[in-house]
């Protein structure tokens, strides 16, 4: 315990963190104060290296099997996909190869080799620009601990809270969170983690109220004390007063009833009170997640992140694999469209498969996305051929990421034409009329949206990068994240400009990223002329609910007022005032389950 931490057992106290999963939980604290696994640091003799490697590989298999047992106990959904991704991490050839080198060349025992390789990967992820990848640090640590425990012959450190308890820990692994779902816990509080940590995503998927990133929480509460977890406000109340308990119980019942009503209506279309249809689509990263969008009532897939097909594996995805994956997703979502973004690798999404070894001083503005695809043309063409073939099986759309100029777009279009020519020459069937679109993520693209619209079938605004590049701010840098302002006048004008360019050219314009998933911004986006929104699947029901309860006239009126503001803070105050009054269930405390942070868009 840190000397500065407050001892538990005192009077009523409050702690604040990140609202990771909405809902209100009330229960007795179950404190998990784990200590790091003690790793033996023993040198072995040369003759024992093969035996030691065998022990390591067997422990990896045992760990994968442990996760498989947990996975099979869960219903289908995002949580199972996360556990499957962890199993894939345990097959990572880089990790396995590095551990075997440490055993064979440096004569370290398997436990020591696993710990060393894990520390190296942890340090690499710590340098990533993207919060999503930094959050993967805890994943690799948890997996390493399981492997080391298997090597030591111990069972994983199992958490066994009673039903209705509030689990309080420094951090939790996805497997831990899955187990807590079966224990029917009331809530989760962790000292570490953010909204994009896998434990937070698991909690949202399993609908367990959770607050993460609560400093000093382990030293502030004892097991057996009463705790209220407010996953809407991001608040944890320790040893609450009697009146508070009653008030939160009423609020919990009201919140749960509201959530149930929203979920029951998820299949209804998002049509405003005066008849304007808004398409609400889902963002997906893995084919294993395809059930999610449909289960939440999405109108198809507005962003399928194909780059995840290139990660955590030792071979490139083939044309045939691209074809089969796209065909599977298309058949699942028929007759709705599916937008496949060509691989958006580089920067904070590295892939050793593309052979990029040069260190870049500013990777966010370096060799990435379409620039990288055009440099690795054969790999790019294989993906395009697979997608063009799959487009025969449904309304597939191809989207090019991070286009900054008309010349860059023309190069991308030329690659698509080349892929068509290759299929034609090979006598293979393909869709000759597959729509091609462009992602608007740079200020330069937004400013020439009229020129781009003349050459594409659709455009999609990626707000996460567009805000970052427009405002010159790293949203994951705590020192400047206050400058990450979606309602900044510059951002509103850029979005409006793109929407107007699309309308003039009769080219549909969609928007994906955090803004689409945040109920505070729904009226503004529709008021700016964006009638296609793509977001995290779990955000769809709430955004639909807001649209169905609104008129396009009142959205336009609020947007006109916001466009007259001079600062982001003035715009934010105006929007929050109106939206909280109209939709108190969603925005009374700053947003509900739909306020989901996307890892990218």
Image: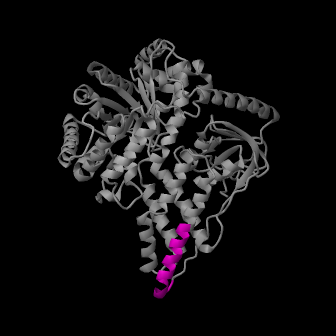
Q: Residues in magenta?
A: 44-61
Place of residue 228 in the rendered image (x, y in percent of width and height, measured from the top left): 72, 40
Q: Is residue 97 left or right of residue 249?
A: left
Instruction: Check the image and report above or below for 61 versus 395.
Output: below
Place of residue 281 in the rendered image (x, y in percent of width and height, measured from the top left): 45, 32
Report which quarter residue 355 is drawn in. bottom left
Place of residue 353 in the rendered image (x, y in percent of width and height, measured from the top left): 33, 58
State the residue in front, 9 or 288: 288
State the residue in front, 83 or 469: 83
Instruction: Check the image and report above or below for 230 versus 366.
Output: above
Residue 562 makes an appearance in the image: yes
Q: Main secondary structure of the magenta part?
A: helix
Single out the residue that lies furthest toward the right: 242
Q: Report the quarter where the C terminus lies.
A: top left
Q: Is residue 134 left or right of residue 428?
A: right
Q: How is the image coloured?
A: one colour
Q: Is residue 390 left or right of residue 132?
A: left
Q: Residue at x 32, y 35 (%)?
A: 439
Q: Residue at x 47, y 68 (%)?
A: 117
Place of residue 45 in the rendered image (x, y in percent of width and height, measured from the top left): 49, 87
Q: Residue at x 27, y 28 (%)?
A: 447
Residue 349 makes an appearance in the image: no
């Amino acid at each position: 315990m840190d000397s500065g931490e407050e001892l538990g057992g005192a009077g009523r106290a409050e702690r604040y963190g990140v609202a990771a999963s909405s809902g209100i939980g009330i229960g007795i604290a179950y404190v998990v104060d784990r200590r790091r696994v003690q790793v033996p640091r023993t040198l072995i003799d040369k003759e024992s290296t093969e035996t030691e490697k065998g022990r390591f590989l067997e422990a990896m298999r045992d760990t994968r099997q442990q996760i498989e047992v947990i996975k099979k106990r869960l219903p289908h959904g995002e949580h199972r996909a996360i556990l499957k991704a962890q199993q894939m991490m345990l097959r990572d050839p880089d990790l396995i190869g590095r551990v075997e080198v440490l055993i064979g060349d440096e004569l370290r025992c398997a436990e020591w080799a696993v710990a060393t390789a894990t520390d190296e990967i942890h340090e690499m992820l710590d340098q990533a620009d993207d919060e999503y990848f930094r959050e993967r640090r805890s994943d690799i640590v948890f997996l390493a601990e399981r492997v080391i425990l298997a090597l030591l012959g111990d069972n994983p450190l199992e958490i066994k809270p009673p039903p209705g308890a509030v689990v309080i820990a420094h951090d939790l692994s996805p497997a831990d969170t899955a187990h807590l779902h079966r224990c029917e816990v009331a809530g989760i509080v962790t000292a570490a983690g953010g909204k994009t940590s896998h434990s937070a995503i698991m909690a949202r998927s399993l609908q367990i109220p959770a607050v993460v990133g609560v400093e000093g929480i382990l030293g502030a509460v004892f097991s057996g004390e009463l705790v209220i977890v407010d996953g809407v406000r991001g608040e944890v109340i320790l040893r609450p007063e009697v009146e508070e308990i009653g008030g939160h119980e009423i609020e919990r019942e009201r919140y749960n009833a509201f959530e149930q009503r929203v979920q029951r209506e998820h299949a209804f279309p998002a049509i405003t009170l005066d008849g304007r249809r808004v398409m609400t689509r889902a963002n997906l990263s893995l084919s294993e997640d395809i059930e999610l969008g449909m289960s939440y009532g999405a109108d198809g897939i507005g962003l399928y992140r194909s780059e995840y097909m290139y990660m955590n594996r030792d071979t490139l995805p083939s044309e045939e694999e691209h074809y089969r994956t796209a065909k599977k997703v298309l058949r699942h979502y028929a007759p709705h469209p599916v937008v496949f973004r060509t691989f958006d690798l580089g920067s904070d999404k590295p892939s050793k498969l593309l052979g990029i070894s040069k260190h870049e001083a500013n990777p966010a503005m370096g060799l990435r996305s379409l620039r990288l695809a055009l440099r690795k043309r054969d790999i790019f063409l294989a993906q395009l051929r697979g997608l063009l073939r799959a487009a025969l099986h449904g309304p597939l759309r191809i989207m090019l990421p991070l286009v900054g100029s008309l010349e860059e777009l023309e190069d991308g279009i030329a690659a698509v034409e080349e892929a068509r020519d290759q299929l034609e020459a090979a006598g293979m069937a393909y869709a000759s009329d597959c729509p091609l679109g462009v992602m608007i993520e740079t200020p330069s693209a937004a400013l020439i949206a009229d020129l781009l619209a003349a050459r594409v079938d659709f455009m999609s605004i990626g707000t996460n990068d567009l805000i970052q590049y427009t405002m010159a701010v790293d949203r994951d840098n705590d020192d400047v994240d206050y400058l990450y302002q979606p309602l900044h006048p510059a951002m509103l004008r850029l979005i409006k400009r793109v929407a107007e360019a699309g309308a003039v050219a009769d080219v549909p314009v969609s928007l994906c990223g955090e803004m689409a998933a945040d109920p505070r911004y729904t009226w503004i986006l529709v008021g700016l002329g964006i009638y296609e929104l793509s977001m995290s699947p779990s955000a769809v029901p709430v955004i639909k609910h807001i649209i169905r309860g609104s008129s396009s006239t009142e959205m336009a009126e609020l947007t006109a007022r916001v466009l007259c503001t001079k600062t982001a803070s003035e715009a934010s105050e105006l929007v929050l005032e109106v939206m909280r009054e109209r939709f108190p269930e969603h925005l009374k405390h700053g947003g509900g389950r739909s306020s989901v942070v996307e890892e990218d868009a």
